[in-house]
Amino acid sequence: MARRKFVCGNWKMFKTASEADQLVRDLRSRLSSGQVQVAVAPPFTALAAARAALTGSPIQLFAQNCHWEKQGAFTGEISAPMLKELGCDGVILGHSERRQLFFETDEMVGRKVRAALEAGLHPIVCCGETLQEREGNKTWEVVSRQLRGALDASTAQQVTIAYEPVWAIGTGKVATTAQAQEVHAQIRGLLRELGGAAAADSVRVQYGGSVKPDNAAELLAQPDIDGALVGGASLKADDFARIIAGAR
Ligand code: 13P
């Protein structure tokens, strides 16, 4: 079954609201509506501006995190229903920066996935090993533990997965197509085990980690690579548009 490619720009902690407005406009002027599903994920404070600038566009709006409770005494946190009401289509969950710098566990990511789905947001669930884990031949042990901890039979059918080797994030060191394809195929096997054939056939598995205009097409041509989660290169409209063109 052909899965529609899905490319999402994770802006991380870059762009004020006015800068986000400008970047979305620049991006819209460079994209023709195509077969590729496209999303941008600005910081919380720029979501409303980005939503307004995306009016009438098929480009989707994602947040970069949410809390698992709908509301409560959680100073500084944002809930899934809040994001939904703001016009978000989905949310990135369990990014390695959240896991490493803000101590998110697999169990927390699982609670966030359920909260997002309940609010009507599409989750992109991130996984990936560190350099030390890869060198210790623990890649699949780590990635499968992360996904088993965050997904169950029902949620496994309703998400997008992003495989992002931590050593490839922001380093310019991209995984080889063979390295990426190997893990993507294993993830597809796990999706089959968790969510059955429907999950294995329909869930998109994005690659993330130093995706650039010059390596996107080759990565995205792999049979189990269904898109990309792009960091740095998504902050430049030209580069992001070229990556999307490479996904076609
Ligand atoms: P870079 O594309 O900057 O390596 O970041 C990848 C990433 O973390 C996307 O979520």
Image: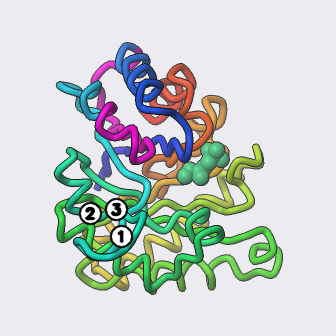
Q: Kindly report the distance in space between the C-alpha atoms of the residues bearing marks 1 and 2.
A: 7 Å
Residue behind mark 1:
67
Residue 91 belongs to the span the image colors magenta? no
Residue type beneath disc 1: His
Q: Which region is colored magenta?
A: 30-50
The reply to whether dot 1 and dot 2 touch (C-beta < 8 Å) is: yes
> Within 10 Å of the Cα at label 1, are there few (<14), some (14-19), or many (20+) other Cα atoms?
many
The reply to whether dot 3 and dot 1 touch (C-beta < 8 Å) is: yes
User: Which of the image's four quarters has the C terminus?
Assistant: top left
Residue type beneath disc 2: Ala
Residue behind mark 3:
78
Look at 29% across and 40% down and name the residue there.
60
Image-based side of 126 in relation to 81, left or right: right
Look at 59% across and 77% down and name the residue there.
103
Q: Which residue occupies the foreground of this view, 25 or 230?
A: 25
Some atom of ligand 1 lies within 8 Å of the CB belonging to the residue at label 3: no
- Whichever of labels 3 and 1 marks the residue nearer the N terminus, that label is 1
* x, y percent for residue 220: 52, 44
Q: Which residue occupies the foreground of this view, 117 or 209?
A: 117
Q: Quadrant of residue 149?
A: bottom left
Q: Secondary structure at mark 3?
A: loop
